[in-house]
Image (cartoon, grey):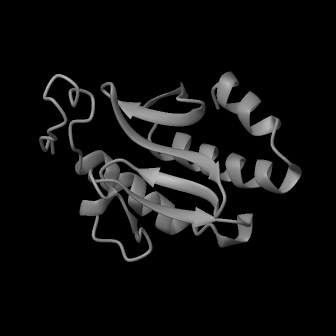
Amino acid sequence: MKEEIQTYNDIQTSDDKAICNVLAQTIDNELTEAESKIWHAHPVWFLDGNPIVGYSKQKAGWRLMFWSGADFEEDDLNIKGKKFKDASIFFSTVEQINTKDLERWLNKSRDIQWDYKNIVKRKGQLERLK
C-alpha cells in the first residue's frame, strides 16, 4: 500500500481503519497497474490518469465510489450519481465488505470506463473509453 494512503488509513478510528485497510489492500491486489494517491483529501486509484475507484468518510459511513460504476449493472452499487456515471456503496463495519463482490467490481472498473480525465477539456461532457 502506498505510504500516503496507509497514513490516511492510520489516522482513522480503529473500526474505520479496519474498513480502509481492507478496501485499500483489495484494490491494490486487484488493480496492480493502477496509480494511487490522496486526491481531493481521499484515497483514489487511477488507470492511465483516469479516476477509477476511491473511498471517503461520510455521514452514512464509508463510501466506496466507482467513477464509472453506474454501468456495472450491480445491484449493490445502488447510490448513483445524478450528473455523472458514478455508483457507490456504503460500509459502516468491516464485516459488511464482501471482498468477492469488491474484486468483481474492480475487474469491471478496468473494462468499463468513462473519460473523467478530460472532462474539463470537454466542458463537462463524458465520453466512454471502454
Front residue of 1/117: it is 117
How many marks the image carries: the answer is 0
Q: Nearer the viewer, residue 41 or 50?
A: 41
Q: Position of residue 84 (x, y in %)?
A: 27, 50
Q: Quadrant of the C terminus?
A: top left
Q: Which residue shows up at 60% across the image and 46% down it?
A: 56
Q: Is residue 127 above or below residue 120?
A: below
Give the image location of residue 26, x and y in percent. Answer: 57, 50
Q: Is residue 105 left or right of residue 18?
A: left
The residue at the point 41 percent across, 71 percent down is 78
Q: Please report the residue visible at 46 percent of the width from the left and 35 percent of the height from the top.
A: 45
Q: Which of the 4 image quarters holds residue 3?
A: top right
> Which residue lies at the image location 28% right of the left edge and 70% below the top edge?
73
Q: Is residue 78 above or below residue 66?
A: below
Residue located farthest toward the right when viewing the structure as drawn: 14
Q: Is residue 37 left or right of residue 57?
A: left
Quarter containing the N terminus: top right
Residue 33 in sight: no
Of residues 112 and 31, the one nearer the viewer is 112
Q: Give the side of residue 125 with respect to residue 93, left or right.
A: left
Tell me where residue 30 appears, x and y as whole percent. 47, 46
